[in-house]
Amino acid sequence: MKIYLAGHQGLVGSALLRALNNRSASTIITRTFAQLDLRNQQQVEQLFSDERPSHIYVAAAKVGGIKANSELPASFLYDNIMIASNVMHAAYKYGAQKLLFLGSSCIYPRLCAQPMKEEYLLSGPLEPTNEPYAIAKIAGLKLCQAYNSQYGTRFISAMPTNLYGPHDHFNTESSHVIPALITKFHQAKIEGHPEVVLWGTGRALREFLFVDDLAAALLMLMDQYEENQWINVGSGAELSIAELATLIKQVTGYEGRIVFDSSKPDGTPRKLLCSEKIRAHGWQAQVSLEDGLKRTYDWYLQHHCTAPSFVQLKEKTHVC
């Protein structure tokens, strides 16, 4: 078996690579962005022509938080549509046995009934702050269905809830909520800031899943799942952004105040997936949010505290 893992250096891809390496002796094909631009159809087809992978995981995507989606809507739409269409068409053209496309819970309507079931897709308007990314992901899962219907392929789609863990993007400008909060609280701690200001009211409700739990789910789906219907992957637990911020404050050891700027958007009011379908296949999340946050923060400390300012502060304060 030859497995092509697209996006192996990202949050999901790195977790998948760990899981695949621990599981089997299959040949795993990876390429960095410098080696292969998945937006380029000719380059993608050359890879498939040369390697002929039998199984494909499409974990590559352009991702970001509310600010990045608002500032770069064309990039989020174009890049993600091109990645999905190029990889799927090459998989079909060169006879791959199975493909798994990774979507996102943001595909569901902004005011979707909760918890969100697979059949609720396209039942209402999307959240404006991440609409371009959501539309691209919807196009990807619909491409899976269309290729299956027209060509008899075995392309499946998984829709995970909000993810976090090692190898995420940790900055305050373009990252998702958990890595952004970890960065904010850590920097506030080492720089002695008396408060951390966060966007929104803090009342929005979110569900989170540790990325290694998702990797286990995706391997199981590649083995067992054959339906021409996307499937949700969530932890089943939710909390408010204010509660999440308090928990990350504790994990990072920050002792100042949390202030919410209600003039900034909250995003979707509530996002909780109905994951009954995947649990019926025998999967469920194993890592608690608190444990996952501790593991994520430990990884952050090991990989993001090497800049001169961090090194100097570490010598002085022993907090990094």
Image (spheres, grey):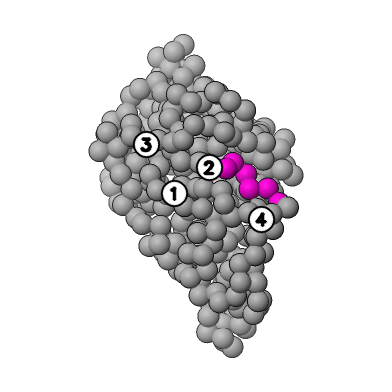
- What residue sits right under mark 2 in the picture? 270
Label 2, label 4: how many angstroms apart (C-alpha)?
16 Å
SS for dot 4:
strand
Q: Residue at x 47, y 52 (%)?
A: 239
Q: Which mark is residue 199?
A: 4
Of pointers 1 and 3, the one earlier in the residue sequence: 1
Label 1, label 3: how many angstroms apart (C-alpha)?
13 Å
Q: Main secondary structure of the magenta part?
A: loop
* 32 or 113: nearer the viewer: 113
Instruction: Give percent across and percent down for residue 251.
Output: 47, 69
Q: Is residue 146 left or right of residue 201?
A: left
Q: Magenta region: which residues? A: 264-269
Label 1, label 4: how many angstroms apart (C-alpha)?
19 Å
SS for dot 3:
loop
Look at discs 3 and 2 and give the one toward the viewer.
Answer: 2
Of pointers 1 and 4, the one earlier in the residue sequence: 4
Residue type beneath disc 4 = Trp
Label 1, label 2: how many angstroms apart (C-alpha)?
9 Å
- What residue sits right under mark 3 in the picture? 275
Neighbourhood count class around disc 3 (C-alpha, 10 Å): few under 14, some 14–19, many 20 upward: many
Q: Residue at x 58, y 69 (%)?
A: 185
Quarter of the image containing the N terminus? Answer: top left
Q: Is the residue under label 4 in contact with that under label 2 (CB below 8 Å)?
A: no
Q: Which mark is residue 238?
A: 1
Give yes or no for residue 267 being in the magenta stretch: yes
